[in-house]
Amino acid sequence: MNEKLTDAFDRAVPEQPPTSGWGRKVRGRVARRRAVTGAALGVGAVALAVPLALNLGGSDVVLASPEPVPPTQSSEVGEGPDYPVESHERPECREADGTRVRVTELPGGKLPEGAERIWLCGGGHEGAVVNDTELVGARDALTVGVDRAVEAFNALNYVEGAAVDCVSDDSTYHVVVEYPGGQTEVVQGFNTPDGCDHFQLGGGVVDGGAQGYLDLLAELWAEQRAGQPVPEGDVQVCPAATSVWGIDPSSLTRGYACVPAGDEPRMQEELPQELVDRIVEGMSGTERAGTAINPTAPRLILINEHDDPVTLRWQTFGDGKALVWGGGWSVWRTDAALDAGLAEVFGAESGGPVHPEPEASVPPVPTDLTECPSASDAYEDGINVTLGDLIPHGYVCLETNDGVVTRPLDDALAADILADLQRNAEPRLQQPLVQSTERLVLWSRWGDPLSISWMGGGYLATYPGGTWNTWFPPVELSSRIYGAITGGAGSCVAPEPVDPASVTVDVYTTTGDAEVAERVAEGLREAGFTVREVGLTTDSELGGGFYVRHSPDNGYAAGWVGGVLGQSGSGAVSRTDDVVDVVLNADYDVNAGFVPVDDARPRQELVCS
Amino acid sequence: MQGEAATDRPAQFDHFVDERGGALWRAAWLLTGDAHHAEDLVQTALTKTYPKFAGFDDPRRFEAYVRTTMYRTFVSWWRRRSWRGEVPSEIRPDAVRTADDDPALRADLVRALAQLPRKQRACLVLRYFEDRPTREVAELLGMPEGTVTSHVSRGLAALRASSFLADEEDAR
C-alpha cells in the first residue's frame, strides 16, 4: 500500500499551474497588511519552533533555521503610524526604555508561586497598530485571585525550546506577574484569528490555552471590579486604543473624539453624553457585516467605567455612513441625526468636509474579457474593494466553453443586490478561495470590480477586502439573480423542510461510557431523529476529534445532527451508506446541552430552474 | 540573499516563487484537493514568510521555512474551522489534467484523503509524497515521532478501508 500510495500521489497530482505573478501578489499582500496594521509582520516571536531537517526537491537535506530575532523585537519598527506618545497603558507594561515589556525566562515554563499582582498589557511591540487600533490591557492591576491565575497558567503544557509560529497578526497580549520586591515575570499570549493559541516565553512555548487564559483573566478582573469604586479622571485613549479582551458595548459609558480628524489625532475631546448613549444603543444591535476600515475616517473611542476602550471609525458604508470597529467585522449604520452630531464634532475641528468621497463613475460593461474578474481582483496591489465601496451598477460574467460572456446587470436588480449583500453577507474567517464560472460583478466607486460567484442553490460567495463572505439572498432576489445569470426568467423555490425523522443516526462511543452514548441518543431522539443503533466502539482510526461522520450524500443531515449536539468538531466523509455516525470520544463535552432541532437546521439550498 | 542590495530582494523573491511555487503548490494540492485552495495555501504561507526572506542566505533554507509554514497553516486552518462551517459532502475534484491524465484516480484519491483528519493527511503527504522520514515529519509539524507514526498508521488504515481506493488496490 505504501509504495502504491506514493505512486498514486505522484500520478494524481495535477500539473502545476503557472506561478508567474504570485511573488508580486504576495509582496502586495504584505505591503497592504503593513499599511493596515502599521506594525511589523516580522515580530520575532514568529520564529520556527525547532530547527528543521527538511528535504528539498528530494535531494539534499537542508536545515531550516529561523532568522534569529528576539521574541518582542520588531525588525521593522517605525514603518507604521507614529503612535502614540502618550499611551493608555500603565508604566508596568513598559520596559525602562519605554518599549513594550519583553518576555522572561521561566524555568520549566512555570510561574513561581507567591505573586502579588498581575498586569494585563497589550500586544505586539509598543505602538503596534492592529486592525486600526492599538491593543491595550487593563489600567488596574489584578490583586484578587492572583494565585488562581498563576495556578491556571502553570497547568498548561510547556514545550522547551520552541517558538510560536504565527506571523499574520499582532493580536497578542502580555501578562506581567509581579512579586514582592518588584520582581516581574512576563509571558506573551497569542490569540490570533488564524488559529495561534499559544504563549511565548523566553525559553519556549506554552502549547495552547492563550485564548482561554484571557477569558479567565477577564473573569478574575470582573470579580475584582464588582462593587469597587470606579477610577476618576480622564484617561488618554487617542489616537487609538482597544482592549485586548472583548468589551460588551452596553458597558460603555463615555466616549471621545480623536481630533483633529487626520492621520495623527492625538487630542481627545469628550463626546456629549447623549451622543455616547445613542452610539452605545446602536452598537448593541449591530450587524456583522465585515468591511475594510478607512484609515482616514474620523475616529471615536468609547470606554467603560474601568477605562477599557474600543476604537470606532465613522466612515462611508454603501450609500450612507456607519461606525465600524472590531477590525471591520462590526458595522452599525448611523442615522442622519447621529451623522449630524458627529459631523459637528469633527467638522468644527477639521474646518472642512469630514472626508470627501470621490464621485462614483460607472465603467462600461467589458466585452473583450478572456476570463471573468477573479475573487482576488478586489484585493490586489493598491486595490481594496469593500462592501461599503460598491455602487449599484455591474454586469453578469460567465465563463463558458466558448469564451467569456458578459451582459449588463439591470440597475434596479443591482441596487437590490447591493442592499441585501451589504446587509446580509456573512464574513467568514479562515477560508480559502471559492468561486464559480458564473459571476456577478459590481463596480466600486473607484471603478474596481468585485466579483460575486453564484455557487448554485441561492448561495453566493465573494471576497470584499480580501475576506471571504457568504451570501444567501431571499428567495425572490435569488430568482432574479438566477434569471440574470441564465438570461431568462429564473425561478428559485425553497424545498420542503426535511423531516428529522428521515435522518437515521448511529451513536458510538470510544470511551466505553455507554451512559453518555445513551444520553446523547435520547437527546437526538427527542429532537426527532431516528436513532438506529447505540454502542461502544474501539475504532481507533478516527483521530483526535469529535466527529459526526457522513456519506457524500447526507452532509446536510450530518450538519443538522451536529448542530443539535452543539459541539465543535470536524465533519469527515467516512460512510458510504445514508446513516449519520455520531462518534463520541474523550473530547466530547458530556455537560453540553442540546440545541433545539429547528435552531440547528442548516440552510437548505434553493431549487432554481 | 542576505547581504545583497535591498532593492534586489523583491526580484529575488519573485524569482524564487516562479521557480519553486509550483512544487509547493503540488504538495498544497494534495493537502487541500483543490487548485484554488492550494494556491491560496501557498500564497498564505509565502505571505507569512516573505518578511523573513532577506534573512536567508540559501533559497533552499527559505523553501524549507515556507514548507513548514504551509503545513502548519494547513493544520491551523483545521483547528480553527468549525465543522458546521464546512461544506460537508460535495467534493469536486479539479477539472485539470494530470501528466498521466488519470482523472478517476485523482477523484478517488481526493475523496479518500478528504475522509482523513488534517493532521493524518499532512503526515501522509509528508511521508509518501515528499518522502520524508518520520523524524523530519515530526520536526516539521511540531509533534512527537510517536504521534506521527500513529497518524500515518491510522491514515493508511483509513485509506485501505476507503471504498474510494479499494478499486485502486484491487487493480494492482
Image (cartoon, grey):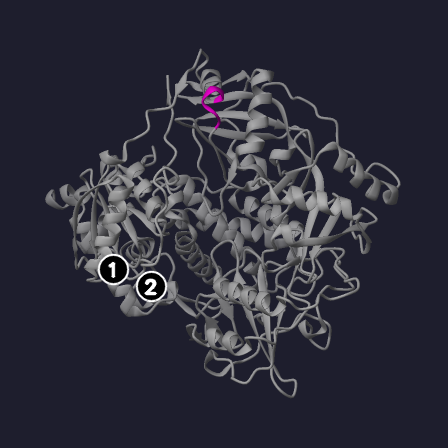
Give yes or no for residue A474 being in the magenta stretch: yes
**Quick check: A444 left or right of B156?**
right
Q: Which mark is residue A392?
A: none
- Residue at far front of view: A227
* Foreground of the two, A513 or A69: A513
Q: Are marks 2 and 1 on the same chain?
A: yes
Q: Residue at x 59, y 16 (%)?
A: A412
Type of the residue with mark 2: Val
Residue under numbered circle 1: B152
The residue carrying pointer 1 sits among few (fewer than 14), some (14 to 19) or many (20 or more) residues within 10 Å by Cα, namely many
Q: Earlier in the sequence, mark 2 or mark 1?
A: 2
The reply to whether residue A245 is in sight is: yes
Q: Which corner quadrant of the image does residue A450 belong to?
A: top right
**Quick check: A240 left or right of B81?**
right
Q: How many marks?
A: 2
* Foreground of the two, B86 or A73: B86
Mark 2 belongs to which subunit?
B
- Residue at far top of view: A488
Q: Up-down: is A508 above or below A424?
A: below
Residue under numbered circle 2: B137
Whether tag 2 and tag 1 are in contact, CB under 8 A, the answer is yes
Image quadrant containing the C terminus of chain A = top left
Helix, strand or loop status at disc 1: helix
The residue carrying pointer 2 sits among few (fewer than 14), some (14 to 19) or many (20 or more) residues within 10 Å by Cα, namely many
Helix, strand or loop status at disc 2: helix
Q: Which residues are magenta?
A: A473-477
Type of the residue with mark 1: Val
The reply to whether residue A9 is in sight is: no
